[in-house]
Image: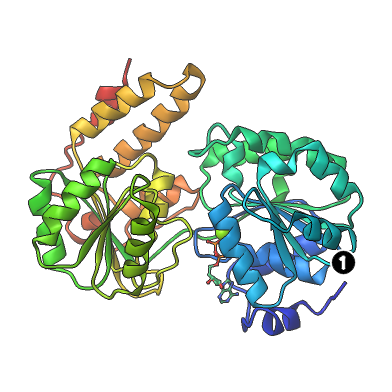
Amino acid sequence: MRSDVPALLHDVFGFPAFRGVQQQVVSRIMAGQPTLAIMPTGAGKSLCYQLPAVALEGCCVVISPLIALMHDQLRAAQAVGIRAASLTSVDSDWRETQDRLRNGDLDLLYVAPERASGEGFRSLLRATKLALFAIDEAHCVSEWGHDFRPDYRLLRPLLDEFPDVPRLALTATADHHTREDILVQLGIPHDGMIIAGFDRPNIRYAVHPRDGLPRQLSDLIAAREGPGIVYAPTRAATERLAETLTRTGRPTRAYHAGLDPAVRAANQAAFISSEDMVMVATIAFGMGIDKPDVRFVAHAALPKSIEGYYQESGRAGRDGEPAEAHLFWGADDFARARQRIGELDPSRQQGERTRITALGGLVETGSCRRAILLRHFGEDPPASCGNCDNCLNPPASIDATETARKFLSA
Ligand code: ADP
Ligand code: MG
């Protein structure tokens, strides 16, 4: 084990210092304490397990929900010289990886939850020296979360089989219920929860009633420079809007999971390298995309949750420079939400209703938008942020029509 953590931070990762709560999280892991780290996207969660993985003897097993995400991380880790591998359906070097694992020749191993909980994998781990379990996107373990993955529920027996191996759960998006649930589901004590600041002061938030969306969006884009993302609710809406917005003269592309993979990849690459492109996308676009200079994010309709909204709008202004988040909504969004909720399993309906009601509070408030976002993440914000539509132009009368409640009350 290497105890010179600050030197590792610099020599291996090339960072001069820890950011935010990273140091706190790393210290806990180095001391073997189970931890839930709640840190916004871009805060640097990966380092919280990658650094202990290098410093501690043995291998760190990382549970991650998406192969694409795993491979991005894997490449980044290997690029800085970390001995890392993955065991997924698209990897062909299983035998070599298993040998390296048994020989103590790996710092990091990425696996999907369904694989991690299998008996074959567990017996492999019994023959391996383990440093740490890192459970990335840990909100997937909770039915309260916005992205429940039943396979995450199978992790607990695996973790409990190795009681001396510390566990670190990481997530960007957890409201109160989800947090409590993660602690319970993964067996982490309450005092093991570390929450980082969620405020993104350089993002200016604004909410608009939808009223001729193509024109509203065209005007928005015409008045702004730099790359932007427009989130649309359906694949069809994505293509329709992209076509309309192209007529503004701004380079515009569409992105959704139904596009040919080559087209999708080309559009994404074009956006990443562009200084003025507008990407009209479903929420399939964004995970793992690290473009620091996105100047605005617009939502063409109500997002699915405050967590989703925070994450999607948070893709603006990663470079710390001024950026904007615009949300367009209409009462029909709530009608659609009600319909969607009605089709869900009854056990999930209440959670969804709570999520939509929280969004109603965000779009219909006459007071600070940022305060609503931050309170949702358990922070205690000042009454006014000075950088959202309501703080900059206080509405003359607060006319809360309570659309969410109207549509969702049974
Ligand atoms: P998250 O998983 O929380 O969204 P990542 O782990 O992907 O964030 O890190 C986001 C970015 O921050 C990466 O480009 C990473 O290299 C960078 N980063 C992480 N820790 C630090 C640090 N201490 N100093 C500077 N940059 C950092
Ligand atoms: Mg991450």
What residue sits 47% from the left and 28% below the top? 351
Give residue 382's position: percent from left, percent from top.
39, 58
Task: Tell which of 356 and 195 is nearer to you.
Answer: 356
What residue sits 17% from the left and 58% below the top? 393
In which quadrant of the rendered image does the C terminus lie?
A: top left
Give residue 84's position: percent from left, percent from top.
72, 66
Left or right: residue 30 compared with residue 302? right
Left or right: residue 172 compared with residue 3? left
Where, by quadrant of the figure, is residue 177 drawn? top right
Give residue 197's position: percent from left, percent from top.
51, 60
Task: Tell which of 110 and 325 is nearer to you.
Answer: 110
Task: Tell which of 243 and 150 is nearer to you.
Answer: 243
Residue 178 visible in the picture: yes
In which quadrant of the rendered image does the N terminus lie?
A: bottom right
Count residues near mark 1 (Cα–Cα under 10 Å), then give few for <14, some for 14-19, many for 20+.
some
Give residue 353's position: percent from left, percent from top.
39, 27
What residue sits 53% from the left and 33% below the top? 144
Is 75 drawn above or below residue 101 in the view shown? below
Residue type at numbered disc 1? Glu
Residue 32 visible in the picture: no
User: Tag 1, which secondary structure?
Assistant: loop
Left or right: residue 37 compared with residue 278? right
Left or right: residue 230 compared with residue 265? left
Is 134 drawn above or below residue 249 in the view shown? above
Task: Tell which of 53 and 386 is nearer to you.
Answer: 53
Judging by the rendered image, the residue that carries numbered circle 1 is 57
Ligand 1 rendered quadrant: bottom right
